[in-house]
Image (cartoon, coloured by chain):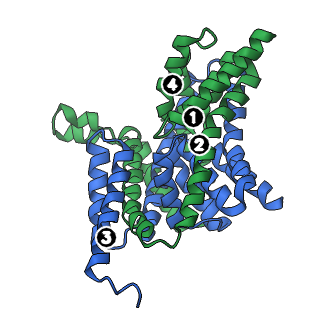
Amino acid sequence: MRELIKMFLAFARIGAFTFGGGYAMLPMLQREVVERYGWTTESELMDYFAVGQCTPGVIAVNVATFIGYKRRGIPGAIFATLGVITPSIIIITVIAALISGFIGNEYVAHALAGIRAVVCALILNAVIKFWKSGVKDWIGILIFAAALALSVLTPVSPIIIVVGAALIGAALTLARGRGNGGAENG
Amino acid sequence: MVEYLLTLLMLMWEFFKAGLFAIGGGLATIPFIYDIAARYSWLDAAIVPDMIAIGESTPGPIGVNIATYAGYNAAGVPGAVLATLALVFPSMVVIILVSKVLKKFAENRFVDGVFYTIRPAVTAMIAAAGWTVLSTSVIDLSAVSAGWSFENLLAMFHPVALVLFAAAFAASKIWKKLHPIALIAAGAAVGIIFKM
């Protein structure tokens, strides 16, 4: 039970300080669930983002469910997911109920402009960490470059990119298996 | 009373469907919201732009924020809570099922090979998301679209944002223990002080 509560609170912190959707959540996730609690690894986090992108629902919630389930089964999944959505429910309800001028408020706009610049730096940091544990060889570099070009220059859906990369991985595994069939046994 | 309970039930059903079929992150929820607003009187399509603005400018996953806002507008606090829970329920079930399958194939050479090439792609997609934020908040590419002159190149950079970006990156590299929350709070303070 203690770890479930810890999990709820960790994900509530992540939910309360993520500005700008799922990807912006990555620096907070790395800090809380990888570095601080060791509930998952950098590589697994990447896999969760990839699968979370292709399954229905909000990516941040999907990643929370993944980590919670991995750690503590279904109760873990529930506590992590409730943790990540609770701050939103409270903050949005308060804003919707009480603060009618939130959107036009100049202080909110200034604060958000500052937060966005910081979020860019945090994402850059997160990308460097992912690069270190996820891009291992020239195939990885090529896939990174192609995926980056596709996401920045074309409106291709992220799902297509993930599925495309998966197919390349499957083809390479098959090719390798055929090339040195006996190698894996030894 | 009966009408209110029916609204809550409808709300849950509609957001359950949105959670089940909106693939690709929070903003994929928007078309579902328009669809709901078109079919029911308890949700007004006119609030959708505000909903997106609030969803993006408050902490938390955007899709969750949107569901909470829509639920609150349709049926108050119970609506906010139920719409959000209904939205995340299907994806929770799907992820638990996917986890079970992945666990089964954890040592599988094939699954390993597939994730081996997916990881660089995910890294690139996150870099691209960072670029999207950067190209609107720290640099402004529209400044050079008028032509490549020195003035235009200079106008491309928001000086305060650029310094803040560099300082935040340096700080996170120098003080590894510094929590992202501290940097986010500092960013908000700098934004207000310098009227960014």
Circle 3 residue: A174
Chain label for disc 2: B
Q: In terms of secondary structure, where does tag 1 sit?
A: helix
Q: What is the CA distance from the residue labelled 1 to the residue labelled 3?
A: 35 Å
Residue drawn at point x = 32 percent, y = 46 percent: A151
Chain the render paints green: B
In this view, the residue farthest toward the right is A1
Circle 2 residue: B91
Q: In terms of secondary structure, where does tag 2 sit?
A: helix
- State which mark lies toward you, 1 or 3: 3
Q: Position of residue B170 (x, y in %)?
A: 47, 61
The colour applied to the residues of chain A in this rendering is: blue
Residue B37 appears in view: yes
Circle 1 residue: B19
Contact? badges 4 and 1 (CB < 8 Å): no
In this view, the residue farthest toward the bottom is A186
Q: Position of residue A118 (x, y in %)?
A: 50, 48
Residue drawn at point x = 59 percent, y = 11 percent: B40
Residues at marks 4 and 1 on the same chain: yes
Residues at marks 4 and 3 on the same chain: no
